[in-house]
Image (cartoon, helix red, strand yellow):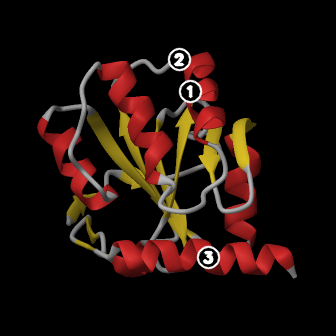
Amino acid sequence: MKIYVNKEISNHSIDNVTGIVLSGNNFIPPHLGLVISGNYFSCSANSVKTNVPFSRVFNKLKRRNHKLLIAELDIPISIQKSREIFNDYGVLCDDKTCLGPVKKTIEFHLNQNFKSNFIFELLPVLEEKRIIKSYLQFNLDAYISNNCFNLPTYTKEEVLGCIRELQILNVR
């Protein structure tokens, strides 16, 4: 999926941003979260994070030299309802992926259901509906040409393998 990147993320721009957060070393697959007015929500293999200041998450990702892309959303999202959705979804296991609570939150606030199983399927649908306002990036300069970034595709097996690997690392 080709993404037109509008600007780089700065400490100032993250305080009020609302959008889908894609992060990781290589984006195969990316970890997905949601930032709402500068508050971060995420379900991972080891924990559920709700209402964490995104500035803390951003600084941690910078220290780890991770890549970051935010699809800035042009819809109001309730922090309270998002907390409920993410907590109900819980820690990732079995067939649950980090896309689940992000997608459920957006579907709830739009009162629509989407048939997408991957972020590279969901983003074009949201673009078509004009729900994505812009894309912000950090540490992707080497992968951007003419303001465009190619979001890699991946399989469900790669996602589940990544989750299993993180669960094993957490046990050690």
Q: Cα distance, mark 3 to mark 1?
A: 25 Å
Q: What residue is drawn where x is 66% and y is 62%?
A: 45
Task: Give the structural element (helix, strand or loop) at label 1.
Answer: helix
> In the image as oriented, which residue stretches furthest toward the right?
172
Find residue 128 and report its horizontal and vertical position in percent: 12, 39
Q: Is residue 87 above or below residue 58?
A: above
> In the image as oriented, which residue stretches furthest toward the left?
128
Q: Cα distance, mark 3 to mark 2?
A: 31 Å
Find residue 169 and report its horizontal and vertical position in percent: 77, 80
Look at discs 3 and 2 and give the one toward the viewer: 3
> In the image as oriented, which residue stretches furthest toward the front?
94
- Sooner in the amino-acid sequence: mark 3 or mark 2: 2
In the rendered structure, the answer to whether residue 83 lies left or right of residue 124 reads: right
Q: Label 1 belongs to which residue?
A: 82
Residue 153 is tagged as: none
Q: What residue is drawn where x is 60% and y is 60%?
A: 93
Find residue 112 and report its horizontal and vertical position in percent: 24, 25
What is the three-letter code of the residue carrying label 1? Ser
Q: Label 3 belongs to which residue?
A: 164
Find residue 50 and report its horizontal and vertical position in percent: 70, 36
Q: Are marks 3 and 1 in contact (CB under 8 Å)?
A: no
Whether residue 39 is visible here, answered yes or no, is no
Task: Give the structural element (helix, strand or loop) at label 2.
Answer: loop
